[in-house]
Image (cartoon, rainbow, N blue to C red):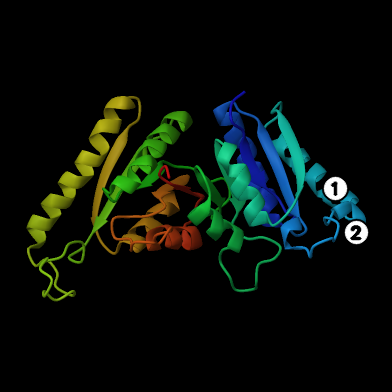
Amino acid sequence: MSDPVIVGVDGSASSLTAVDVAAREARLRSTPLRIVHAIGRPSAHLPSGVAPWSPADHGLEPLVHGQLARAEERAHAAAPGLEITRSVVTGDAIEVLGIESRSAALTVVGSRGLTGFSGLLLGSTAVHLAAHGHGPLMVVRGRPDPAGPVLLAVDGSPAGEPAVEFAFAEAALRGVPLVALHAWNTWSERAYEGPGDPLTAVVADADRLREAEQRLLDRTVAAWQETYPQVTVERRLVRSRIRNALIDASREAQLVVVGARGSGGFTGLLLGSVSQALLHHAHCPVTVVRGKE
């Protein structure tokens, strides 16, 4: 059996919207959908000798299974005939979904959960899974039923290569064009590399830098364009702040694909600033693709 699409639910409006999207993603991939609800606290956190915590002990099972039943109804409505399983797992949602993501074709979550604080644009579960999960993570956000091309954030880094492959596969699967967007500016490259050189030095020859960035974009796209000849690709080179360019382009996309870390990331950071900005502000769903670890 193919690896399932997994969606995390908690009864929030955001998670129910994620169920709709996850069901359509599962149907698109001809794979089952698994609906997961994590509840309670991990037994490992309990004092020695205390029996493991269970939702049944607190009369929560009817509530939880009622939420799951509603989620399953929505999934069947979004993708009739889809094979669906559902599961209640005792434990922290971040930990549970992190484990579930190891065997998922795609993990889908809403941008906000029931535990979100007022004013926060993105829930802690989505942030953590984007940084620490396994496989591609889709965070459902933005306008409802987005249409348009798949938008790929190109940075040219080796860590970003899995995102390039995923974006081409998604465009082929959906039968839509791919926009490969690479944003650059005069901060894109250091002017000097010596140990005593100023860290704030930037390249002044913008024409030379633009040509180099165009070559980077062409090189990144070329190999995968041969693998997916059916995908129409627009190579879009934009002189702009990277985050602003991608967020603006997401207004006309149905999905943004980005690597977990870009070429400008600091060692030790598991989620780059561009990925974080898209997760908070994109106008359509965002899929973060991590490299193999």
- Give me the residue at 63% from left, 60% from top: 112
Q: Secondary structure at mark 2?
A: helix
Q: CA distance from mark 2 to mark 1?
A: 15 Å
- Give me the residue at 77% from left, 63% from top: 46
Is residue 61 shown above or below 41?
above
Position in image of residue 278 (x %, y %): 44, 58
Q: Is residue 127 visible?
A: yes
Instruction: Locate residue 247 relative to residue 15 in the image: left or right.
Output: left
Is residue 56 shown above or below 46?
above
- Viewer-nearest residue: 54 or 223: 54
The quadrant of the picture occupied by the C terminus is top left
Name of the residue lying farthest toward the front: 49
- The amino acid beneath tag 2 is His
Position in image of residue 226 (x %, y %): 27, 26
Position in image of residue 120 (x %, y %): 58, 70
Instruction: Locate residue 111 relative to residue 258 in the image: left or right.
Output: right
Callout 1: few (<14), some (14-19), or many (20+) C-alpha neighbours within 10 Å? Answer: few
Q: Secondary structure at mark 1?
A: helix
Q: Which mark is residue 135?
A: none
Mark positioned earlier in the residue sequence (2 or 1): 2
- Give me the residue at 57% from left, 45% from top: 145
Mark 2 highlights which residue?
58
- Viewer-nearest residue: 209 or 134: 134
The quadrant of the picture occupied by the N terminus is top right
Q: Are marks 2 and 1 in contact (CB under 8 Å)?
A: no
Q: Which mark is residue 66?
A: 1
Position in image of residue 102 (x %, y %): 56, 41
- Viewer-nearest residue: 249 or 127: 127
- The amino acid beneath tag 1 is Gly
- Give me the residue at 29% from left, 51% from top: 155
